[in-house]
Image (cartoon, grey):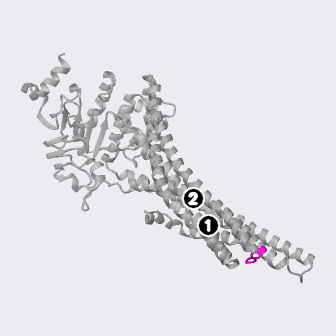
């Protein structure tokens, strides 16, 4: 983990080195005050060879020199604060980019188990903490580490006995830090999880706010949110308890330093084992030692936040990506001849979704999948683009095993229109262009015309540049469906999958969209999943899928004559 974290510094190593160099000078300048204090008290004030005016002149010159050093330190601190944070932000951006790229490569199965809000929490909140650690971590460790070492060596040169007595308190501080560190780490990890739970709940509630209002279930949503909110308070309280124990104990140890200085220093001065000037220097210098020590102690919280955030970041990066064969081939245009051969499939949580399914679809033919919900129809549609890997068996397109094709070349030949249309927050033109990003505006218009939505678009004030809102909220269900159809027209795939594309529409809108779909199907291998049997009676072949198996297949007429499962479905819909 540490090596991976360090790798993000590489693009900014020059600026990082300058940042550390500036930090070094900040530490060195910090040593100026106790050194000058000792020089004035030890060599200038008691020097009888110097007259009062000369002593004052030396003191003033030392003060001016120290002020100049402090001015330089001010500039160095500005550099460290500004450019150090810039490094942290850039590293955060790099991590976020890596996470986003990783998310694009993860299989469908990953998103079956993950909530959007939790993923967003890792990409925003967690990486913000990592960014702060990336900046303040090296800076605090370097500045404080150098200051502690230099102050120790300097105090050692003044009086080694007194110095060792003072530093005898350090082991107590280390032990306390180690004891509470593990406890704090666990507490902050739980806090991260609770924040992710809140984000997931919030994302779900905001997305579904219209449904909530329609069913007047605001109180229910508040109740669900409060569960996550209370869990957050509970986990945060545990974290703060650990922090309280940690900081109160470590602060007591740092206070102990002052007690040791007071007692041990007074005894040594009393026995004339140390000069009063050195004792005063110790009193001044002890803060030079305690302050960076306190900074390191306070840094523990930030360290825990950053480390737990980075671990959660790595959890996503270490997820197994979609795997295509090393020798996968790139194909241009597929004809669309599809064959399922003894295909079985199961999800992680659902077994025997498909069992030894075999069928063949000739290029350019239109087949329909019908049957009760949960029978496996949509799963068949998801297996063709290789969204999921089959448990057993093989799927062939144009005689090629889909596992031998690159994901890109396979999926660019497949167009999907689903019941639940997803549109991006942007303009109408941008959403249609998603079908083929390099298409011209004329091609976009042509696709819209084929989808029977061009006339509506032109009636809008901003036409194709009209913003449709989040997930196309400003459009009706039929309008969204026609936009998705225009998107597929623009893509121009050789294989078309219609997964209950019209089941959520009213009859009038369905008839309008069905015309667009009929045109879309021309010249393409088409798989239609439908509950309304009236829309698939003209299919070349109909497959009845029940309990993960093909129970029967044939034309509409043949299946009615068999008086089997299809006939029962038909009878239930048309002869109630």
Q: Is residue 46 visible?
A: yes
Residue 441 in percent (x, y) is at: 43, 43
Q: Position of residue 530 (x, y in %)?
A: 23, 31
- Left or right, 346 with respect to 276, comes to left
The extreme bottom residue here reads 49
Earlier in the chain: of badge 2 and badge 1, it is 1
In the image, residue 479 lies at what x, y percent? 39, 30
Identity of the residue drawn at 13% across and 28% down: 556
Circle 1 residue: 144
Residue 493 coordinates in the image, percent (x, y) = 28, 44
Q: Is residue 36 left or right of residue 102?
A: right
What stretch of residues is rendered in magenta?
A: 271-277
Please, what secondary structure does the residue beneath circle 2 have?
A: helix
The C terminus sits in image quarter: top left
Name the magenta segment's main secondary structure: loop
| Separation (CA) of disc 2 from disc 1 | 11 Å
Residue 299, numbered label: 2
CA neighbours of label 2 inside 10 A, class few (<14), some (14 to 19), many (20+): some
Residue found at x 20% / y 21%: 573
Residue 412 in the image: above or below residue 28: above
Per the image, is 276 magenta? yes
Question: Residue visible at 69% across and 77% down?
Answer: 159
Q: Is residue 557 above or below residue 9?
A: above
Q: Secondary structure at mark 1?
A: helix
**Residue 293: mark:** none
User: Horizontally, is 511 left or right of 182 in the view?
Assistant: left
Q: Are marks 2 and 1 in contact (CB under 8 Å)?
A: yes
Front one among 104 and 111: 111
Can residue 35 be seen in the rendering of this structure? no
């Amino acid at each position: 983990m540490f090596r991976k974290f360090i790798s993000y510094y590489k693009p900014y190593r020059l600026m990082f080195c300058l940042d550390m160099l500036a930090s070094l000078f900040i530490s060195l300048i910090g040593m100026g005050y106790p050194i000058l204090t000792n020089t004035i008290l030890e060599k200038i004030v008691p020097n009888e060879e110097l007259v009062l005016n000369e002593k004052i002149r030396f003191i003033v010159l030392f003060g001016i020199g120290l002020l100049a050093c402090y001015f330089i330190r001010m500039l160095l601190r500005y550099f460290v604060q500004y450019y150090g944070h810039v490094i942290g932000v850039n590293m955060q951006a790099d991590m976020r980019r890596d996470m986003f790229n990783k998310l694009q490569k993860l299989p469908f199965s990953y998103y079956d188990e993950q909530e959007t809000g939790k993923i967003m929490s890792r990409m925003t909140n967690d990486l913000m903490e990592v960014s702060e650690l990336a900046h303040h971590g090296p800076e605090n460790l370097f500045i404080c580490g150098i200051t502690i070492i230099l102050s120790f060596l300097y105090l050692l040169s003044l009086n080694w006995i007194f110095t060792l007595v003072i530093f005898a308190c350090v082991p107590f501080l280390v032990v306390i830090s180690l004891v509470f560190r593990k406890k704090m780490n666990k507490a902050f990890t739980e806090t991260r999880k609770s924040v992710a739970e809140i984000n997931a709940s919030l994302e779900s509630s905001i997305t579904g706010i219209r449904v909530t209002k329609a069913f007047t279930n605001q109180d229910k949503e508040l109740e669900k949110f409060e569960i996550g909110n209370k869990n957050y308070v509970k986990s945060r309280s545990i974290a703060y308890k650990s922090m309280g124990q940690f900081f109160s104990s470590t602060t007591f140890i740092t206070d102990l330093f002052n007690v040791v200085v007071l007692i041990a220093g007074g005894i040594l001065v009393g026995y004339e084992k140390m000069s009063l000037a050195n004792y005063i220097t110790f009193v001044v210098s002890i803060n030079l030692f305690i302050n960076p020590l306190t900074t390191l102690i306070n840094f523990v919280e930030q360290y825990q936040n950053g480390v737990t955030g980075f671990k959660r970041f790595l959890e996503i990066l270490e997820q197994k990506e979609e795997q295509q064969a090393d020798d996968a081939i790139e194909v241009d245009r597929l004809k669309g001849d599809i064959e399922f051969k003894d295909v079985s499939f199961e999800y992680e949580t659902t077994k025997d979704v498909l069992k030894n399914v075999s069928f063949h679809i000739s290029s350019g033919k239109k087949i329909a999948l019908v049957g009760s919900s949960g029978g496996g129809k949509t799963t068949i549609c998801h297996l063709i683009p290789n969204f999921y890997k089959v448990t057993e068996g093989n799927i062939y397109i144009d005689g090629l095993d889909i596992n031998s094709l690159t994901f890109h070349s396979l999926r660019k030949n497949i167009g999907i229109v689903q019941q639940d249309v997803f549109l991006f927050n942007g303009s109408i033109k941008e959403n249609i262009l998603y079908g083929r990003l390099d298409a011209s505006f004329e091609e976009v218009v042509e696709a819209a015309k084929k989808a029977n939505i061009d006339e509506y678009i032109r009636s809008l004030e901003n036409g194709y540049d009209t913003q449709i809102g989040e997930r196309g909220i400003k459009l009706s269900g039929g309008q969204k469906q026609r936009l998705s159809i225009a998107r597929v027209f623009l893509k121009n795939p050789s294989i078309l999958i219609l997964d209950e594309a019209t089941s959520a529409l009213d009859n009038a809108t369905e008839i309008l969209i069905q015309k667009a779909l009929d045109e879309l199907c021309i010249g393409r291998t088409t798989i239609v999943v439908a509950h309304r049997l009236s829309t698939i009676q003209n299919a070349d072949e109909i497959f009845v899928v029940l309990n993960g198996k093909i129970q029967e297949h044939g034309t509409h007429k043949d299946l009615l004559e068999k008086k089997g499962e299809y006939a029962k479905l038909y009878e239930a819909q048309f002869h109630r």
